[in-house]
Amino acid sequence: MADVYATIADAEHEVQERLAIVLERRAADLQQQGMLRAYLADMELPDGARVLEVGCGTGAVSRELARRPGIGQVIGVDPSPVFLAAARTSAENLPNLEFVEGDGRALPFQDNCFDALIFHTTLSHVPEPQAALAEAFRVLRPGGVLAVFDGNYTTTNLATGDFDPLQACADAAMAALVHDRWLIPRLPALVKDAGFTIINQRSFGFVETTAPDYMLTVVDRGADVLAASGRIGAELATALKAEARNRVANGNFFGSITYASMLAKK
């Protein structure tokens, strides 16, 4: 199974609508909100800054940016018309926010026209991320800020001990649903090669135990991937999902992912 986000505009309408709900649910998570606000606070922007979010999805991050004091204009770009329709509906009361359909590897903007550009959980889903970073460099003004935030999906963990069967679900889900699980370890070299100077890097932990709203979806997706590939049977996939929920009920569920942010300047 390929990363659906890598070719999201080609996905079935129903799939895009379902993923739009997932994106908004993730954006509402308090841990996700805390990580977003922490790295946005690191950004130093001029008054009236013009900001571009590439891969904006349903616009949750763009809305947060548009509400921040001193931000002049925010533009969100995404290849999915379904995501953008949801984004526009949610941003009707934000006059400094607009959305444009487009590909981050070929941005429909002139050179040197933004003060900041953000990839929020986007680059790990982009084939040829170096092309997206080259476009970021092109459209940023001299001294403009690049912000990248993404999961280090090689760290996705559901295990509570050696040979834990739930870890197979985590590994299968990430291999199937993230185009580049190794994006974060490779990011410093990619950013430098694009011409940027790195000014800040941070690491964040995301953990779910008693209320694993997101990590249970990782279990389910991973079990389904394993079954669809023929590596396990349908009965075992069902048993793995049940085991995860039993752990929640018994108070011994654990799921975690490490995230990272990077700020750089043109």
Image (cartoon, helix red, strand yellow):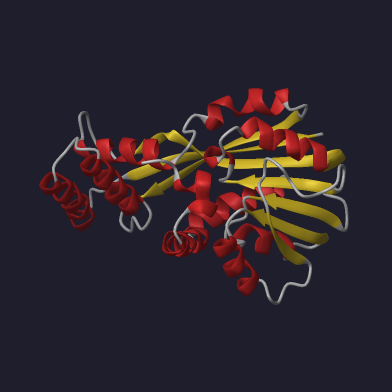
Residue at horizontal 30 percent and vertical 56 percent from the top:
210
Camera-side residue of 134 and 188: 134
- Please indicate whether residue 211 sits to the left or right of residue 25 in the image: left
Residue at horizontal 61 percent and vertical 36 percent from the top:
202
Q: Quadrant of the C terminus?
A: top right
Q: Position of residue 228 (x, y in %)?
A: 24, 43
Camera-side residue of 54 and 161: 54
Residue 102 visible in image: yes
Residue at horizontal 67 percent and vertical 52 percent from the top:
102
Give the vertical position of 186 relative to 23 (above or below): above
Examine the image and state in which quarter residue 263 appears: top right
Give the vertical position of 67 relative to 157 (above or below): below
Q: Position of residue 73 (x, y in %)?
A: 81, 61
Q: Quadrant of the N terminus?
A: top left
Residue 44 visible in image: no
- Please indicate whether residue 232 sits to the left or right of residue 103 in the image: left
Q: Position of residue 114 (x, y in %)?
A: 83, 48
Residue at horizontal 74 percent and vertical 52 percent from the top:
52
- Please indicate whether residue 180 sits to the left or right of residue 256 in the image: right
